[in-house]
Amino acid sequence: QVQLVESGGGLVQAGGSLRLSCAASGLIFGTYPMGWFRQAPGKEREFVSAISASGRTTNYASSVKDRFTISRDNAKNAMYLQMNSLKPEDTAVYYCAVGRSGGFDGTSSSPPAYAYWGQGTQVTVSS
């Protein structure tokens, strides 16, 4: 079965950086688009970033654009999210997800477009 495991979260001061990783198994990783979402307490899950199966296309929420960078290494079945210039409002549980459509070399910001989700990793940014 498909498994996704996030890591790299933690506590950081505002202005700092973190790099999240998502390790995937149970699928032909390089054929699926991937995404990062986050959920803060009392708020709905929101889109952060997505990357196409090939890695050629990326998409970002306006709130993180120019601060976060998504990437993937299909040889290692892994996806990453480099987060720079972190703000207290970035505090949330971050989830990685696998798109439903294998062979689709595009991206989606919609949660229903994703079939599998990791357990999440907590990111806390102090002011």
Image (cartoon, rainbow, N blue to C red):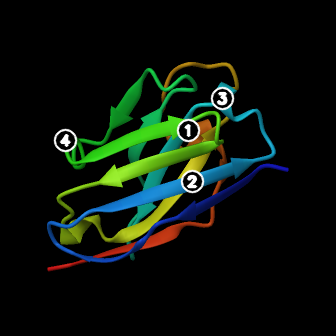
Q: Residue at x 59, y 45 (%)?
A: 78
Whether residue 80 is visible to the viewer of this picture, yes or no, is: yes
Marks 1 and 3, Cα distance to the nearest angstrom? 10 Å
**Could you tell me the amino acid type at mark 2?**
Cys
Q: Which marked residue is nearer to the observer: mark 2 or mark 1?
A: 2
Report x, y in % for residue 112.
59, 42
Disc on the earlier residue, 2 or 1: 2
Query: Tag 3: residue type?
Result: Gly
Q: Which residue is mark 3?
A: 30
Is 58 above or below relative to 64? Answer: above
| Label 3 to label 4: alpha-carbon separation | 25 Å
Front in this rendered view, residue 43 or 102: 102
**Tag 2 near tag 1, CB within 8 Å:** yes
Q: Judging from the image, what secondary structure is the residue with disc 2 in?
A: strand
At mark 4, the secondary structure is loop
Q: State which tag comes first along the sequence, 4 or 2.
A: 2
Q: Residue at horizontal 57%, vertical 53%?
A: 22
- Disc 2: CA contacts within 10 A as few (<14), some (14-19) or many (>=20): many
Q: Which mark is residue 22?
A: 2
12 relative to 51, above or below: below
- Left or right, 87 with respect to 70, comes to left
How far is the residue under mark 2 from the one under mark 1? 10 Å
Q: CA distance from mark 4 to mark 1?
A: 19 Å
- Disc 4 and disc 2 in contact, CB within 8 angstroms: no
Quadrant of the image occupied by residue 87: bottom left
Residue 2 spot, x, y in % from top left:
78, 49
Which residue appears at 61% of the width and 33% of the height? 74
| Comes first in the chain, label 4 or label 1 | 1
Disc ID at residue 66: 4
Mark 3 or mark 4, earlier in chain: 3
Quadrant hosting residue 123? bottom left
